[in-house]
Image (cartoon, rainbow, N blue to C red):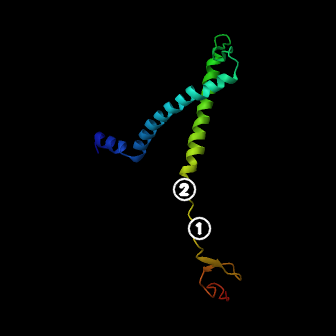
Amino acid sequence: MSLKEEFKAFVMKGNVVDLAVAVVVGGAFGKIVTAFVDGIVMPMVTMVLPANIKWEEWVLGKFRIGAVLGATVNFLIIALVIFLVLVKFLGKFMKKEEAPAAPPTSKECPACLEQVAIKATRCKFCTSQL
């Protein structure tokens, strides 16, 4: 098989195509979540915090602690929004109905404890009456 044919077979595998679609959709959804956080969540956070605190500009020597803290807070807020929207909200709509359990096809012989057919009247192992 030539390199071109191998590459084509690799690209056409379902996993690669699914991954590509997931990355594109994930990027688009990330923009929606970022807009939601920037436009709705962060203004609510600034209403709670005092206006004169600029915690994103905190430094400790040469270390920009505020930038790390800001990125961490943004990540946690984005993760919370994604969890609430995807897992909790959409999860309710995506729940699959569980299939009812199949009726049993065998039963246990009370004398020898072997499994016999459900319609059997005698155990095929110990010949006791069921």
Q: Position of residue 86 (x, y in %)?
A: 56, 42
Q: Which disc, if any, is residue 120?
A: none
Amino acid carrying mark 1 in the image: Ala
Report helix, strand or loop for mark 1.
loop
Q: Nearer the viewer, residue 69 or 108?
A: 69
Report which quarter residue 68 is drawn in: top right
First in sequence: mark 2 or mark 1?
2
Neighbours of disc 2 within 10 Å: few (<14), some (14-19), many (20+): few
Which quadrant does the N terminus fall into?
Answer: top left
Q: Position of residue 51 (x, y in %)?
A: 68, 16
Residue at 55% across / 30% down in the picture? 36
Q: Nearer the viewer, residue 123 or 42?
A: 42
Residue at 29% across / 40% down in the picture? 4
Q: Position of residue 60 (x, y in %)?
A: 68, 13
Determine whether 31 is above or below 88 in the image: above
Report helix, strand or loop for mark 2.
loop
Determine whether 118 is above or below 67 in the image: below
Report which quarter residue 112 is drawn in: bottom right
Residue at 30% across / 40% down in the picture? 3
Question: Is residue 72 something one can see in this rendering?
Answer: no
Question: Is residue 43 something one can see in this rendering?
Answer: yes
The residues bearing labels 2 and 1 have C-alpha atoms spaced at a distance of 15 Å
Amino acid carrying mark 2 in the image: Lys
Q: Residue furthest top?
A: 61
Q: Nearer the viewer, residue 47 or 18?
A: 47
Neighbours of disc 1 within 10 Å: few (<14), some (14-19), many (20+): few
Q: Which residue, given by chain and number where applicable, does mark 1 sit on? A: 101
Determine whether 48 is above or below 100 in the image: above
Q: Which residue, given by chain and number where applicable, does mark 2 sit on? A: 96
